[in-house]
Image: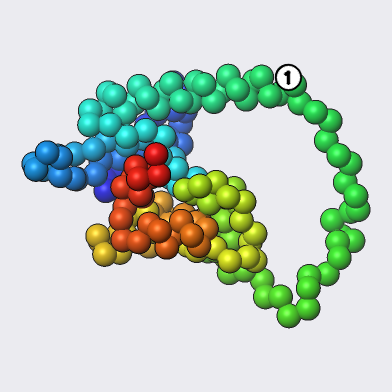
Amino acid sequence: MRTRPIFGGVFGNGRYCLATMACIARGLHAVRYMVIEPRAGSVLSVAEEKTEALQSARRLLRATEALTRIEERQAKPQQEQLWPEDDLPPAAPGAKPAPRRRREIFERSNGRCFYCGTVLQLDGKWHIEHQIPRALDGDDSGINLVAACTSCNLAKSDRTALEFVATLQ
């Protein structure tokens, strides 16, 4: 997969990338275009044409911005902090802190399964998942790793994230 940052308009200052991925379509070699957000490990759009992928991502980002503005106007008051951060109860005895890379992937996925959106616990049972599996030359870079619940990861097997998501719909 090759990526390059997208600048300007709703895409901002390089937060999103245009990625190309070789594939086989109708028995021929082809290229799929994707607009991705590398830090979050999310795919905004996928299309056979570059312009289609960019237009679809623009529509999604504009709709998201509009929803965010509506939510900000209707924001409910936040609950006060119950106790200062310094007075938090100690961790359970014998609990080990999560490794740095696992914490980063968990935070990048906002504590949810990349595929089904199930809420995950940092110290719970969830897998670090390769969107493009190692069997298909996927690497261990941050953009290729996401958090997934056990059932989604085991059901995905050695398929790519796109192939697995297509079977869910």
Q: At 90% from the left edge and 61% from the top edge, which residue is drawn?
A: 87
Q: Is residue 26 visible?
A: yes
Disc 1 packing (10 Å; few <14; some 14–19; many ≥20): few
Q: Quadrant of the C terminus?
A: top left
| The one of 25 and 77 positioned closer to us in this rendering | 25
Q: Position of residue 3 (x, y in %)?
A: 31, 43
Q: Position of residue 159 (x, y in %)?
A: 30, 55
Q: Position of residue 89 (x, y in %)?
A: 86, 65
Work out whether 46 lies above or below 67: below
Q: Position of residue 120 (x, y in %)?
A: 61, 56
Mark 1 lies on residue: 73
Residue situated furthest left in the rendering: 28
| The one of 28 and 33 positioned closer to us in this rendering | 28
Q: In terms of image quadrants, where is residue 104?
A: bottom right
106 lies left or right of 134: right
Q: At 62% from the left edge and 51% from the top edge, which residue is drawn?
A: 119
Q: Amino acid at mark 1?
A: Arg
Q: In terms of image quadrants, where is residue 43?
A: top left
Q: At 42% from the left edge and 23% from the top edge, which residue is drawn?
A: 58
| The one of 17 and 146 positioned closer to us in this rendering | 146
Q: Is residue 8 visible?
A: no
